[in-house]
Each structure stands twice: as structure tokens, then as C-alpha cells.
Amino acid sequence: MYDWTEEQQAIIAVVRRFVDEEIRPHIDDFEHNGVPPYEVLRKMYATFGLKEMAHENFKRQLERKISGEEPVRARQGSDPSAQLITTIELCRVSPGLVTSLGVSTGLAAGTINKLGTPAQMERWALDLMTLDKVGAWAITEPDSGSDALGGMRTTAKRDGEDYVLNGQKTWITNGPYADTIVLYAKLDDGASDDVRNRKVLTFVLDKGMSGLVQSSPMRKMGQHASPTGDVFLSKVRVGRDRLLGETEEPKGGGRQSAKDNFVTERAGVAAMSLGIIEECERISIDYAKNRKLWGTPIADFQLVQLKLAQMEVARVNVRNLVFSHIERSLHGAIPTLAEASAMKLYSAQAACQVADDAIQILGGNGYVAEYRVEQLLRDARVLRIYAGTDEMQVVAIAKDLSRS
């Protein structure tokens, strides 16, 4: 694949028009007025029939779960292009929208569909896939960070037929507003002092449960369109019906489930980065052609040309990563951990560098909100932190390569 097809270009045009008409005029509401993003995302779902598509997708996944077929991501012919196009176009204006959407419909719903029983899928996943409800995926803790699994301190202790959960999760996307929370906890069975290697269980919690507290949104550097907060658990009692798979040994559960989600997240960051890069490059080219110094457009100055050229190199490279991912998905090829981490490491750094260079080209105008590149730099910066920091990507790449 070397370019978008005519059909894909038509989808791009329609999505871009929606973004220009329905999102760009309201970006200040997300950036400065604390307006949650969910209503505009639901409007997007209604406009493009995504809710109906989610129903059909859920129906297929449920049928496969009941019949015992392999998950769809492992089957040949899965085409992620429509989803990635939406990601790219939304990230041109507000990467935070993609973060909130992806966590709710992807990580939260996806984990339930993968690990849950058919009854659990019907109980929670469908409403998340259609955006009727908002989902959160809670694994990170204040003292674990990059050591998310080994350093986890949130516990699940058996009490008769129930479990009692205690602990704290932090930096949880959609945490303040989530209706449904997919939460990871270490099993405290009193039989092992090796806390790092205890079994990891996955539960589904609902807003308003006794002992569950969701904090107000954090004040952050960027991605203001994606509310982030803490989740506190104090003696939260849950039945086995809230344990995904209703077993402590679900296939692909616990630690493996979290690792699989990291691969999915990391591959998706390339599409997010491409949207940021394309928008920053567009703004920079337009500005450089029209801004004059000493009677000359700054686009004629070699140091500005160098930055524009480097932007184009980054755009081509990241676009090729996205196209390669689409092509391989059509043939049923799933990225290795090393490949997904390499995609994330390069594309996140490229997006940050391009956004920073855009500010430099615009000078003082780049530093003020009106020209938007300062927002895109703030939004891009977290791509080098969440779903694994740059440093952890290097470790993941090296370890995965050494095993092959």
C-alpha cells in the first residue's frame, strides 16, 4: 500500500468536513472551559453510522465467543483503515478526543470482549462500543508507572464467594466520568510473599459502587479534551460475576491481557502522530509562504526550509508506518512487541519534534493559542509517556528482539 484508495480518500473528505464544522469551532470548550468530549464524539458516531457498525461488530464478536472461534484481530482480512483515518483526522485538531475514544471503545470494551463471558460482554461491552456509556481502563498506579504489573499494589482478596478490592489507580483516562471501569488487581491469597509475581485479575466496576471514588479531572500540560483522574478503592466488594471470565485463569487474561493491550496502543500512536505531523506541517507551510521578513517570504530562508524538509521526512516515514500496519493487518499479521514499540518510539518523537519546529517557524505567533501549534505540541508530548515511556520502548524492543 503506497497511498489511500479512492474510497479511503472519500472517507477522509467526509470525516475532515465533520471535524472542520463540528469540532474546530468548539476546541476552546475542551481546551479552556473544561467541557467533556463525549457529546461531540457521540454526534460523530451518529453522523457516520458508527453506532450501528458497533452493534454489528459486537454481534460478530459475541457469536465468535459463543462458538469458540479465535478473536478477530488474529483473523486474516481485518481492515483498520477506517478507524485509523478517523484517528488521524481527529488528531489534526484534538488528539485528546482520540485518547478518550480509544480507551473507552478500544481498551475497556476490547478487554471485556476478549476476556469476558458472553453474559459479561452483553452486560458491559456493547454500551461502551456504541458510546452509550464511557469506559476507563485502570492499570497504572502512583508508585508503579512503567512497572505497571510488577509494581502493582491494588489488591483483590477473596471473602467467601466475593472479592474485596483496595488500592488506587492514577492517570486514568476517562476516570472522572467513566460509567464502567476495567480494573486490574493483584490477588492477595495470603499464600505468597512474592508480591511482584502474584496473579493479576481483571474486574469490571460500575460508577457509584460503595467504596469506589472517582476524582475530579487533573490539570494537565496537554490533551485537555481527554479527562484524566484517580480511582480510589476502599473495601469495594464485588462478586465473581464482575471477574472477567468468571475465573482466576481466563485464557489470555491478567498479565497477558495487559501486554496485548500495550501492543495495540503502541501501534495506534503512529496514526495519532501522523495527524499531528500533517496539521503542523500544513500550518507551517502556509505561514512560511505568507510571512515576510525584509520583503521576503520566510519560506525562502534556508533554515526555515530545513525545518520544513525535516517535517516532510517525518510525515513520509510515519505515513509509511501507518500504511504498512494497514497492509499487514489485511493479511492477518499482528505486530510483534518490538515492532509496535518501534512504531511508537519513532512516531511519538517525530510528532513532538515537528510540533516544536512548527512553533519555531511561527515564532511569537507559535507561542500563542490562536495559531494552535502550541496546543498540538502540548498534546503530542504525552505520546512519549503513555502506553510506555520512550525508555520503556527501548527496553521492550531490545528484549523482544533478543528472544527471537
Image (cartoon, rainbow, N blue to C red):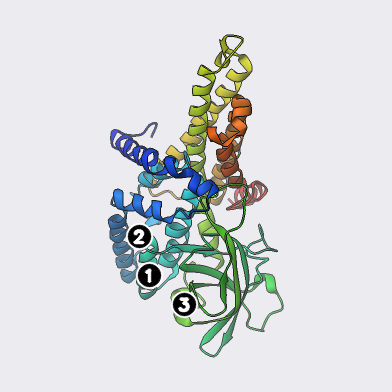
Instruction: State the image coordinates of residue 205 (x, y, percent, origin top left).
Output: 49, 73
Q: Which mark is residue 130?
A: 2
Q: Which mark is residue 242?
A: 3
- Local crowd size for mark 3, using a 10 Å CA cut-off: few (<14), some (14–19), many (≥20): many
- Local crowd size for mark 2, using a 10 Å CA cut-off: few (<14), some (14–19), many (≥20): many
Give the spatial CA distance, label 1 vs label 2.
Answer: 13 Å
Give the spatial CA distance, label 1 vs label 3.
Answer: 11 Å
**In terms of secondary structure, where does tag 3 sit?**
helix
**In terms of secondary structure, where does tag 2 sit?**
loop
Asked if 60 appears above or below 193 in the picture, the reply is above
**Residue at the image position 28 percent from the left and 52 percent from the top:** 49
Mark 3 vs 2, N-terminal side: 2
State if disc 2 and disc 1 touch (CB < 8 Å).
no
Give the spatial CA distance, label 3 vs label 2.
Answer: 21 Å
Instruction: State the image coordinates of residue 181 (x, y, percent, origin top left).
Output: 50, 68
User: Residue under circle 1?
Assistant: 121
Specify the amino acid type for callout 2. Thr
**In terms of secondary structure, where does tag 1 sit?**
helix
Asked if 300 appears above or below 273 in the picture, the reply is above
Looking at the picture, tell me which residue is in the foreground, 22 or 329: 22
